[in-house]
Amino acid sequence: MDPEKLVSIYGGTFSRELGIDLSGRCGEEIFRWLVASILFGARISWKVAEKSWRSLDRHSLLSAHALAFSKEDALIRALDEGGYARYDNRTAAKLREASKTLIERYESDPEILHERASDHIDLERRIMALAGGIGPLTAEIFLREMRGIWEKAQPPLSEFAFREAKSLGLLPEGIADRRLALELLPAASDLNEVEAALIRKRLAERHS
C-alpha cells in the first residue's frame, strides 16, 4: 500500500490526533505528549488511553505543576472518567512522580531534559528515570513522535509498525533490525506519520 494512502485511511501521528503541536518545541506541548505516552504505555487499549488523556485535559491536569500538586482523589477520578479504572492508582502515582521529577531536575521543561542528555541512549534513560514504571516501551512511544524535532530522539521503528510494514511488503525480505528498517521504510513526506498509520492499522486489525 502506498504510504500516503496508508496515512489518509488510518490517520497520522497520535499527538496530532490529540491536538498537540510538537513542531514548535514548546515545553508545555511536549509535556502533554509525555503524559499521553505514559497512558499509551500501559496495558490498556489506546482508545481508553486517549479518552483518559482528554479527561485530564478537561480537568486542567496536563501541566507538570497541575499534576505534581493535584489531589490524588481528583486525579484518580479524572482517569476513571476516561475508563482507566484498572490502573488508576498506579498511573496517578506515576504521573505525579514524573511531574515532580521534571520540576525538580529540569525546571519543569522537557527541553532542558533533552539539552542535558549526552546522546540518544542517555535521553531514553533520563525519560525512564522520571518515574518508577516508565519503561522502554513508554520511552519509545514518546520519542517516536519527537523524532525529527529533538536531535537526540532516535528510536527504532516501533514493533507494531515493523510487523505491519513487513506484512504489507514495504520492507525487504529477511530484514530483522528495526533501526535499519526505519531507514528502508518508504515514506511520503513525514516518516512519523507513516509509522503512526502502520501502528493504527495494526491496532485496528487486532481489535476488529
Image: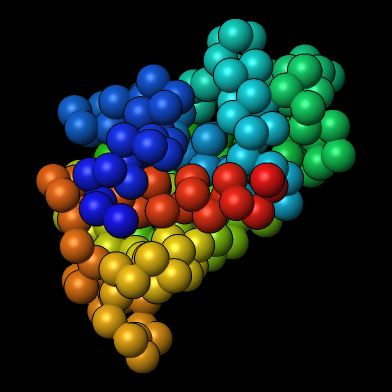
Indicate whether 75 appears above or below 135.
above
What residue occupies the far front of the structure in this picture? 1
Q: Residue furthest left?
A: 189
| Residue plotted at (58% across, 45% down) | 204
* Residue 133 or residue 41, whichever sits in front: 41
Residue at left 73%, top 40%? Answer: 91
Which of the 4 quarters of the picture holds residue 186? bottom left
Q: Nearer the viewer, residue 92 or 49?
A: 49
Residue that appears at 66% across and 26% down = 52
Task: Work out whether residue 160 or residue 5 is closer to the camera in this orientation and state it.
Answer: 5
Which of the colour schemes (rainbow, by chain, secondary structure, one colour) is used?
rainbow
Q: 104 or 48, which is in the foreground? A: 48
Residue 184's spot in the image, x, y percent?
20, 73
Quadrant of image for the N terminus: bottom left
Residue 26 is situated, as x and y percent measured from the top left of the image, at 26, 27
Q: Is residue 122 something one can see in this rendering?
A: no
Residue pushed farthest bottom? Answer: 174
Q: Measuring 42% from the left and 27% from the top, which residue is drawn there? A: 17
Report the number of discs: 0
**Residue 23 horizontal/vertical position (percent):** 20, 32
* Above or below: residue 103 compared with residue 157: above
**In which quadrant will I find the C terminus?**
top right
> Quick check: can you spot residue 52?
yes
Relative to 161, does residue 52 appear above or below in the rendering?
A: above
- Tell me residue 34's x, y (percent): 47, 39
Q: Is residue 84 left or right of residue 196?
A: right
